[in-house]
Amino acid sequence: MENQIKIIIDGQEVLTEKGKTILEVARENNIFIPTLCHFMGADPKANCRVCTIKIHNRMMTSCTTPAADGMEIENNTPELNDIRKSIIELLFVSGNHFCPTCEKSGDCELQALAYRYQMMVPRFPYDFPQKKIDSSNPKILKEQNRCISCKRCIKTIKDEQGRHYFAFRNRGNKIEVVLDPDLGIEISDELALMAMKNCPVGSIIYKEKGFEKPIGTRKFDKTPIGS
Amino acid sequence: MIEKSQITQILQNYKNDRYRLMDILLDLHKIQNYADTETISYLAAALKMSRVEIEETISFYHFFSMEPKGKYNIYLTDSITANMKNRKGILETFEHECDTKINSVSSDGTFGLFTTSCIGMNDQEPAAIINDVVFTNLTAYRVRELVKGMRNGLNLEDLMYENYGDGNNADLDVRSMVCNNIRKKSIILKKDYKPYTFVKSGIKKFTPAEVVQEIENSNLRGRGGAGFPTGLKWRFGSQSQGEHRVIICNADEGEPGTFKDRVLLTEYPEMMFEGMVAAAYATGSDIGVLYLRYEYTYLVRFLNRILDSMRKQGYLGKNIGGVEGFNFDIRIQLGAGAYVCGEESALIESMEGKRGEPRDKPPFPVEKGYLGYPTIVNNVETLVTAVKILHFGAKWYSEFGTNDSLGTKLLSISGDCKFPGIYEVEWGTPLTEVMEMCGADDVQAIQVGGPSGMMVSLKDLSHLNSTQLMKWYKPSGMEVAERFIDRRLSYSDLPTGGSIMIFNNQRDLLGEVVMNFMEFFIEESCGSCSTCRNMPYVMKTKLKKILDGHGVKSDIEDLLSWGKTLKASRCGLGQTAGNPILSSIFNFRHLYEKHIQSLTEYDTDFDLEKSVQSYQKFVQKEPVLFHMK
């Protein structure tokens, strides 16, 4: 077994093959590492930093780092969990996330992680920034108040020619994810639905479909994330 | 809209290659100073991209625009040294004379007035870039004169009536009023080496492996700031497999307070390019790129002339230096205004026409870099130094410096001192000596390594012994200083990419300096990581709260603890973006304590009666307050 390697996550030995990321190995072994920007099937671009782990005392992101033989990884430690929690809190205060009125409540990964890490009141002051809602597209509502700039829609929603429907605009804390006005006008029902589904929060809403699934029957309503 | 034929011509020049989007946009901005919607749509169709994908790149860079700009566009630097030299007054004069506000265009479209991060002129502030021409040492009088001249339609060159700067600044292809201000020369700056000697004759005496070995023996470490061993980088690069290999010279000198690369580019460009040739020979590379920050556009014509002359002499091109099969050429890639592009993988992204967002590592650029090829990115100073090492030998070089930091370092010194400029000093030089050198006799604080470095004082801090604290303001994984007495410049004590800024005892360190640095990081974050996108802003808000007199004890502890989250960022910029606050708490804690309400656990500075006064006035009714004494 030339390809077999052994890594250690929080003291637990795990056998796997070469060529996988630490996150993939952890998931195969039912070890929970939180993620937000990661999306199965798309190239990882560690934007959210929530899956941060420590390898030999150095912080790395588990979604991008390939597992290598003999790696000793810290994952479920008070220090890392506090950093993860603080990142979730940062995302809450830098946007306007009002869960009770959000179409995605119960299906939202940010909300689910906040519950998992028992966020009560964020340690950071709320900023309540002024953000826009772009409702110009006939099918998609782009709610910038809830966007966490994870890039999932940018990476996964493309046309046959590989052109992107979504893209970043500006930089730093002025960054926005915008929908292409030309391509967007002809977006298929299928892609529009996919865009809403791939969004970890409630920033991309397929108009009139937001509440199709009743509250109480949604993904995290009865089973917390990572359980 | 720009004429379709012109756009088509530009696109053809770059073979409709979307990876050359930076050059395409730079050329378009030369024709029209902004990209309009129709032009973008036309580009998008030609490059088979969506409109927002093009706009994604445009909106990332400071010198690109999607809004019309002025006929004359004034970019006034916002570096801290400019602010210390009455930038405010200069700005007010510009605003008044141009009849516009900062970051907008005058109603008649003549003047665009914009703020910009440090432009590498810290030794001659206040400075501004007007239509790519640099104007230094501005005074209110000069500003009035300039604006008047521009209103009268004078050429910018005619407005530069002062003498040209020294050395090559007066070259026919530069013609700039920028001055070199070289104050101290040592082994690297000393002109005891005839350029191209190595390519001409030295190269045949070495095999590529021997070149790598010689650099490894010299223990040369990257001079951009991170200090990665150069020889090791070259070795990794030479061992990676790829159809091509790429050498990039990183001249995106963006760390505020740094300007030594500007001087090297002006006075030692032959050696820099020769260093690239040597690196290419050592690693078997065939593609060379000089990534030059947009602020140094005024040097492009001059640098291209040198490349041309190198080609003519056979130092670039085919079979260089008579070595059969050694083919290598260099092109210049301009940036468009983004500090983060100094990070090597962000620089590569930018070269590929994208936003300058750093890449996740691994893979490292030496394995998979520009267009997927193994890529070696070296700083200007590193390459110049490498040439001297190859000429005089690693043994010669290792006689200078300290055990862990061999050789010398170019310092860019600015701020409150008599002689700002470039100083080449040996590693291990104590900070006190550096202060004497540049004539700084009233020193409150020294910012070593720019805003991402550390703010230190000359006082003995040995009693603090907070190794734990130090960890937070060095990038993850870098070694940590053991002690802080008798501070010296070295990779283990005070590492620096060269920026040294001095602040005297009259300066308001927190309100003036630290605030400026935090605003810099907020402005220059690429926005990719959630941490660096949001945390500097949150920390700055907290600092503001403290400065406004609303701070309490726990606020200082909060800042220290919040700074930890930044360590989870992808690149060095994000990881160090809290350093201005963290290092000033560490070394100047008394300044924070002066502002906080030290006896209370929560903010008591809330006056209920005062707060309801306007309400009271409006409803004309006395409120019933039960908290009264």
Image (cartoon, coloured by chain):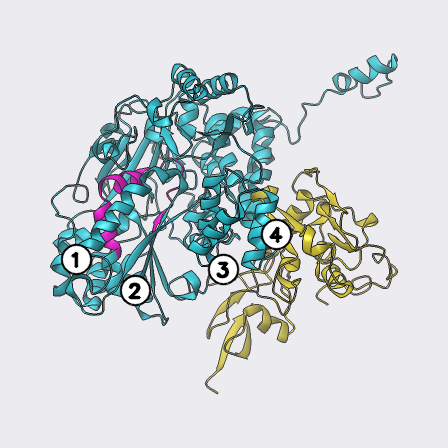
Chain colours: A yellow, B cyan
Q: Is residue A152 visible?
A: yes
Residue at the extreme front: B5
Q: Nearer the viewer, residue B339 or A67?
A: B339
Q: Is residue B398 visible?
A: no
Task: Give the residue type that dot 2 points to.
Answer: Ser
Mark 3 vs mark 4: tell me if same chain: yes
2 vs 4, front mark: 4
Secondary structure at badge 3 equals: loop
**Pointer 2: what residue?**
B285
Q: Is residue A62 above or below residue B183?
A: below
For the C terminus of chain B, the image quarter is: top right
Q: Nearer the viewer, residue B420 or B92?
A: B92
Q: Residue at x 47, y 70 (%)?
A: A71
Q: Earlier in the sequence, mark 2 or mark 4?
A: 4
For the N terminus of chain B, the image quarter is: top right
Secondary structure at badge 4 equals: helix
* Alpha carbon distance from label 1 to label 4: 46 Å
* Alpha carbon distance from label 2 to label 3: 24 Å
Q: Earlier in the sequence, mark 2 or mark 3?
A: 2
Task: Give the residue type that dot 1 points to.
Answer: Val
Q: Residue at x 21, y 64 (%)?
A: B213
Task: Give the residue type that dot 4 points to.
Answer: Arg
* Alpha carbon distance from label 2 to label 1: 15 Å
Q: Which mark is residue B360?
A: 3
Q: Earlier in the sequence, mark 1 or mark 3?
A: 1
**Pointer 1: what residue?**
B199
Mark 2 vs mark 3: tell me if same chain: yes
Q: Which residues are magenta?
A: B248-276
Q: Which mark is residue A219?
A: none
Q: Which mark is residue B51?
A: 4
